[in-house]
Amino acid sequence: MKTLVRFVLVVLTLATGFADSAVRGDEARVVPVSAKRFEFEPKEIHVAKGEDVILEVSSQDVTHGFFSRPLGFDADIAPGKTVRIPVHSDAPGTYTVICDHYCGSGHGGMKMTIVVD
């Protein structure tokens, strides 16, 4: 009987710990990204191979695009809104994120880099 009680206590302790971790969001690092004509800030972020990251992207002026085919996201970033974009890559490399909505004459140079180490 004591063994069963200990087993139940261990299971409940582990389950509570996992639930608390999920509620706190310990499994993903959150990185704020700001978009404005004609740049993303920060211009570069580093992510460890296999790391879960949430990019919280917001626009300071007009609607921008936030696109990376290799990382699998394509989002519209409207002014006054924040879009949460999950990023996970098991492939090390340097990935370019572009604005894919025309936002003015400097639009073609609006890029940021995500480096997966």
Image (cartoon, rainbow, N blue to C red):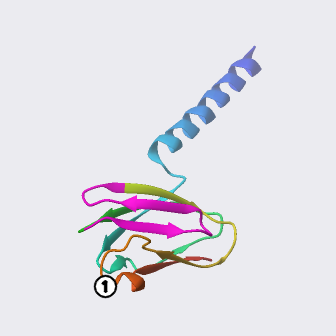
Is residue 54 among the parts visible in the rendering? no
Task: Tell me what residue is drawn at x 74 percent, y 19 percent.
Answer: 4
Give the residue type at disc 1.
Answer: Ser
Bounds of the magenta segment: 62-82
Check residue 81 for magenta coloring. Answer: yes
Kind of element beneath mark 1: loop
Check residue 42 for magenta coloring. Answer: no
- Give the image location of residue 40, x and y in percent: 37, 76
Say whether residue 8 is left or right of residue 66. Answer: right
Front residue of this view, candidates 1 and 44: 44
- Give the image location of residue 102, x and y in percent: 36, 74
Q: Residues within 10 Å of mark 1 (few under 14, many from 20)?
A: few
Task: Tell me what residue is drawn at x 26 percent, y 61 percent.
Answer: 79
- Give the image location of residue 63, x and y in percent: 31, 64
Task: Tell me what residue is drawn at x 31 percent, y 85 percent.
Answer: 105
Quarter of the image with the N terminus in it: top right
Q: Quadrant of residue 43?
A: bottom left
Q: In which quarter of the image is residue 2?
A: top right
Is residue 101 among the parts visible in the rendering? yes
Residue pointed to by mark 1: 105
Farthest residue, direction top: 1
The tally of labels here is 1
Front residue of this view, candidates 74 and 82: 74
Image vertical order of residue 25 relative to residue 115, above or below: above
Image vertical order of residue 12 relative to residue 109, above or below: above
